[in-house]
Amino acid sequence: MSGESKLYVSMGPLVYKAGKSSVLTAQVDLLKIIKHLRTLKRLSKEKGDLKRELHKGLEELSKHLETFDQKMPHPDIPKKFLHKWKKKKQEVRVDKLEEPKVKKHDALDSELLKIQEKLRMLNG
């Protein structure tokens, strides 16, 4: 700053007080944001850990179910009924797959569109 010239500005006490208040409010807001970001980072890490635990638990459950299925007796179905039994089993699986899935974001999207339309009418 040796080559730069300094400029001093005079302002009234009310302007100074309002400016200082704004700066301090901004600092408080920034500190709150930093605090929230740290919390989000911690929660994100916990979420990842819980997902890994869940994945391990599901893999273990899958192995136990396979072992259980291997130990269970399987029915001896005559060949003439086997085709009908497999067909019914496939129909049940198809029914489960074709169930309509409700989107969670539909209500949110429709609300957003309504609000945007109101804003367009106001700013019209």
Image (cartoon, rainbow, N blue to C red):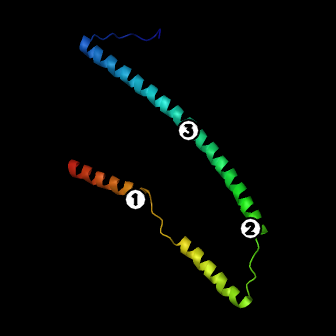
Q: Measuring from the top left, give residue 120's x and y in whole percent.
A: 25, 51
Residue at image coords 64%, 50%: 54
What is the three-letter code of the residue carrying label 1? Asp
Looking at the rendered structure, the secondary structure element under dot 1 is helix
Q: Residue furthest right?
A: 71
Q: Identify the image quadrant of residue 20.
A: top left
What is the three-letter code of the residue carrying label 3? Leu
Q: Distance between the residues labelled 3 and 1?
A: 27 Å
Q: Measuring from the top left, give residue 24's x and y in whole percent.
A: 37, 20
Q: In this view, does 13 lie above or below 112?
A: above
Residue at image coords 30%, 11%: 9
Q: How far apart are marks 1 and 2 (CA)?
A: 40 Å
Q: Identify the image quadrant of residue 45.
A: top right
Q: In this view, does 29 lie to the left or right of 114?
A: right
Examine the rendering and report whether any part of residue 124 can be seen.
no
Looking at the rendered structure, the secondary structure element under dot 3 is helix
How many numbered markers are drawn? 3
Task: Mark 2 vs mark 3: give the one in front.
Answer: 2
Q: Identify the image quadrant of residue 41.
A: top right
What is the three-letter code of the residue carrying label 2? Asp
Task: Mark 1 vs mark 2: give the one in front.
Answer: 2
Q: Distance between the residues labelled 2 and 3?
A: 38 Å
Among the two numbered marks 3 and 1 on one chain, the one whose residue lies closer to the N terminus: 3
Q: Which mark is residue 43?
A: 3
Q: Which mark is residue 45?
A: none
Among the two numbered marks 2 and 3 on one chain, the one whose residue lies closer to the N terminus: 3
Question: Disc 2 marks which residue?
Answer: 69
